[in-house]
Amino acid sequence: MISDEKSTLGLIGPASIASGQIDAVKTAELYQTSLMSALVDGVYEGQTTYGELHQHGDFGLGTFNDLDGEMVGFDGIFYQLRSDGSARPVSDDQKTPFAVVTFFKADSRISLSRISKNTAIDRLTAATQDNLFTAVRIDGRFSRITVRTVREQKRPFPPLQDAAKGQAETILTNVAGTFAGFRTPAYAGTLGVPGFHLHFLTEDRKTGGHVLDFEIEAAEAQLCPMHGLHVELPQSENFLNAKLSSPDMAQRIAAAEGS
Ligand code: ZN
C-alpha cells in the first residue's frame, strides 16, 4: 500500500525509470475485464463480479451482464444506472462483461466554467498525455447533460450498435453531479472507447448514464494518469469466437458509443 502520496507521485516519471526505481513505485494501474470490441460484438456475459473489481479499483465505469444498464463508480461505491432512469448501489455478486476501474488519485486539477463539451474536451486533451490512459473525474454543476442507459438484452444478443438504437436517452438540465471515466489513447482504440468515455451520476445519486453531450456551468476536473495496464480476457466460448479483429471495429465502436 502507498502511505505517502506526495513522495510516491514525486518518483513517477522518466527519472525513476532511468534509475531503475520504477518497480519500487506503485503507479496508478488501469484494470479492465474484457474489451470494448468484444462488447460491441455482442459478448454481453462475463464471469467477473463487482466484488472482484473492488479489489482493483474504487473508480470506474462499465456495464452488467445482459447489458442491464451502465456502471459508474467513484469514492469506492459502484452504481448501476438502468434504462428506467434509476440508480442503485451495485452488489458484490453482480457480474459484468466489461468494466474498467482504477484506484483514483488526482495528479492535477482543472477548473472548467461555462463551456461546451467540445471546449471542455479540448482543455482536457491538452492537459493529458496522448500516450497514456488517464482516469478523469469531473464534479460540478451542469446546465445540460445528455445521457443514455442501455436496455437489458435478451438472447440471441444483437451487436451493441443495434442494441444501442433502443437505448433510453435523457436530457438532464441544471443538475449537479459527478462524471467518472477515462481517456483511452488512439493506439488502444479497441480496448476501450478511444478518446474520452464518461459516465455520470447526479449528486442525489438518483439517475445518470453514459454521457453523450454536456454543457458545464462550473466544475472541477481531476486527472489521474496511469502507467500500468491490466486486461483480463474472458475464457468463454462467446469471447473466443467473437470477431474482434474485423476491419470495421473502430467504426462500430464509434457508432455504439456515440464517440
Ligand atoms: Zn459508456
Image (cartoon, grey):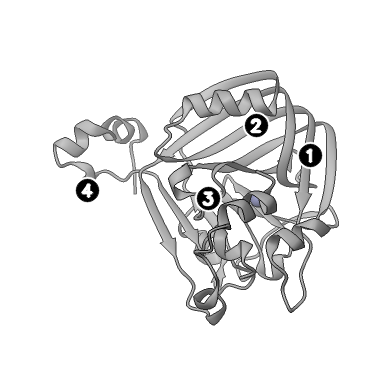
Closer to us: mark 3 or mark 4? Answer: 4
Vertical position of residue 42 compared to residue 256: above or below: below
Mark 3–mark 4 distance (CA, rounded to whole Å) = 23 Å
What number of labels is visible?
4
Label 3 CB-ligand 1 distance < 8 A? no
Task: State the residue position of label 3.
Answer: 58
Vertical position of residue 209 compared to residue 157: above or below: above
In the image, taking residue 162 as reference, residue 32 lies left or right, namely left
Label 4 is placed on what type of residue? Answer: Asp
Task: State the residue position of label 2.
Answer: 139
Q: Secondary structure at mark 1?
A: strand
Q: Secondary structure at mark 3?
A: loop
Closer to us: mark 1 or mark 3? Answer: 1
Q: Nearer the viewer, residue 23 or 191?
A: 191
Task: State the residue position of label 4.
Answer: 23
Label 1 is placed on what type of residue? Answer: Thr
| Mark sitting earlier along the chain (1/4) | 4
Q: Quadrant of the C terminus?
A: top right
Mark 2–mark 3 distance (CA, rounded to whole Å) = 16 Å
Do residues under tags 3 and 4 come within 8 Å of each other at their CB atoms?
A: no
Q: Nearer the viewer, residue 175 or 231?
A: 231
* Extreme residue in the bottom direction: 237
Label 4 CB-ligand 1 distance < 8 A? no
Task: State the residue position of label 1.
Answer: 146
| Mark sitting earlier along the chain (1/3) | 3
Label 3 is placed on what type of residue? Answer: Asp
